[in-house]
Amino acid sequence: MTKLTQMSGDLFSSTADGMAHGANGLGVMGAGIAPRFKKLYPDMYAAYNAEGTAGRLHGGDVFVWKAPGITIFNVISQGILGPNAKLSFVEAGIRKALAVADADGVRTIALPRIGCGIGGLDWADVEPLLEGLAGESICDLEVWAR
């Protein structure tokens, strides 16, 4: 049975074969957890930035980047910078990420409380959404909080 597991600590300590985070449609990774993704996966950032700069990323999209042993899901939870995440964007993006994960054999996606930091969403709204989506997928979700 697919599940959502709550984890505590550093997201980047996860051994999951997939990682996701909330991103904006502009291709910018300057705040929140995004700069860590940018630093650890510079090739991913370059590709994501090119897509955002070209105007090809929109709320609810997911920009998927693959490398040996890891798949990164940049869920476009907000079209622009700041506290502008939308629950509908999180739902659409995570749904798409899980579909890719299921098709590609990604067993677990580790992610922060997506959309709830800089994005401005309330975890009380996001958590049940993620639980429902995890229940529809083969892939498990690990939600990391500090």
Image (cartoon, rainbow, N blue to C red):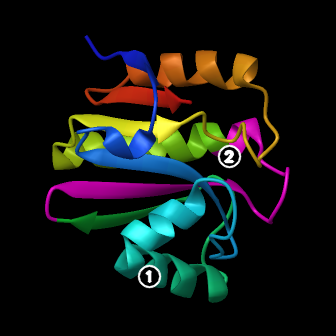
Q: Which residues are magenta?
A: 68-89
Residue 128, image x and y in percent? 61, 15
Residue depicted at x 58% and y 61%: 34
Q: Give yes or no for contact between labels 1 and 2 (Cβ–Cβ under 8 Å).
A: no
Given this view, does label 1 or label 2 mark the residue nearer the observer?
1
Three-letter amino acid code at the position of disc 2: Phe
Q: In which quarter of the view is residue 129 placed?
A: top right
Identity, as a three-letter code, of the amino acid under mark 1: Ala
Mark number, residue 89: 2
Residue 17 coordinates in the image, percent (x, y): 22, 45
Where is residue 142? Give x, y as percent.
Answer: 39, 28
Secondary structure under tag 1 reads helix
Report how far apart the C-alphas of labels 1 and 2 lie in the structure.
21 Å
From the top left corner, tell me how far across and down residue 126 is, in percent: 67, 26
Query: For this rendering, which residue is in front, 133 or 142?
Result: 142
- Asked if residue 57 can be seen in this view, the reply is yes
Q: Earlier in the sequence, mark 1 or mark 2?
A: 1
Answer above or below: position of 8 versus 55: above
Q: Where does label 1 land, which residue?
A: 47
